[in-house]
Image: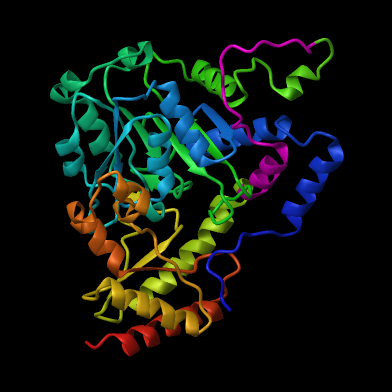
Amino acid sequence: MIPFSPPRVDEKNIAEVVKVLQSGWITTGPRTKEFEHLIADFCGINNVLCVNSASSGLELMLRWFGVQDGDEVIVPAYTYAATANVVVHCGAKVVFVDCNSSDFNINIKEIEKHITENTKVIMPVDIGGFPCDYDAINQLVAREDIKHLFRPVTDIQQQLGRILVLSDAAHSIGATYKGRHTGSLTDASVFSFHAVKNLTTAEGGAICLNLPKPFDNAEIYKCLNFKSLHGQTKDAFSKMQKGNWEYDIVEAGYKYNMTDIMAAIGIVELNRYQDDMLVKRKHIFDAYAQFFSQYAWAEVPLYEEENRCTSYHVFLLRIKNINEQQRNAVIQEIFEQDVAVNVHFKPLPMMSFYKKLGYKIEDYPTSYQNYSQEISLPVYYSLSDRDIQQVCSAVKKAVEKIVSY
């Protein structure tokens, strides 16, 4: 069976984790801080906070910005549940908007239609690792007519004076937009290091801070660090230094910190990410694109263009002119040939929780169209050329068996 997305685990990862275990310090400590600095250097920014998941990072930023009951946060209908769930946790209203037919990402014209005086945050998502059009989004929130609608409630909101752009970059570490890495493209961005991601720490995430002046991103880092450790002014490693035991609790925070065990895995992966992991994933994407471009029924995803390049996270193949039921039958047939595939994503207005809140998939026709025809193919480091051929063959046979063209 060809699996869908197993993590990369080898002797380098194992050796670094063993070193941490033998060091006597396994929770947040020097490895976590080193990982933060490495991510910041990679992205071309100064301040990064590592946390225990991307979901934690997104929620932490929403709470820092003061998002609460009565506020609205715009998110794409086409995303994973975490993007919207964190908004619900804050008591705010999720405002879904439709996606593009070309690249699966949030439709900027639809964003503009849904901005109201209650909009506090826009959360674009880099689906499959392909960056959104951040210049267009940043220019939208900076427009005087849009800023005029903004109703700040907290001092931080007053200081920013506009809608916050919080990028859900869970898929896109290593992707580029106009020569810059994701993480540096807007006010704040959050990466995921979950087990299926390109760069994994088993679980984990990182908040990349890039707020404009007069904000001090170093001070925001300290504030978020407090919030991620129950409002505690010192982490455990700092408290263990000689005579440094005393600390204060400055607010009722959360337990969102990353451990040194997780960071040790991440350091290994980041050090070989650009010149090894991304090279291999690009090879797989290119091989799929070359094969499926031969067939009129296949729509190869947009993953590289003049100003944008993906992180090669998910290969979002679409089968033209089929419906959801046919797509599901194709997937089943692919599995029968011992190849695992997936779907990214079932739009959130189709999920029971959000349907009960009154959202209807009929309001997001492009999201549904993309979903009903999409099949995500395996992309992972140990996938061999022979495996790639098997995947391609399985998809071709399945489509030709289920669908008549």
* Left or right: 17 as drawn, with respect to 313: right
Colour scheme in use: rainbow
Left or right, 54 with reference to 113: right
- Which of these two is toward me, 208 or 403? 403
Which quadrant holds the C terminus? bottom left
> Is 264 within the magenta?
yes
Residue 93, above or below 350: above
Q: Residue at x 48, y 67 (%)?
A: 283
Does the magenta run of residues contain 28? no
In the depicted view, which residue is nearer to us: 186 or 149?
149
Look at the picture and state if 371 lies above or below 180. Answer: below
* Range shown magenta: 244-269
Asked if residue 122 lies left or right of residue 270, the reply is left
Residue drawn at (19%, 32%) of the image = 115
Task: Give the answer, above or below, for where 341 lies relative to 98.
Answer: below
Quadrant occupied by the N terminus: bottom right
Residue in view at x 22 percent, y 47 percent: 107
Residue 270 or 221: which is nearer the viewer? 221
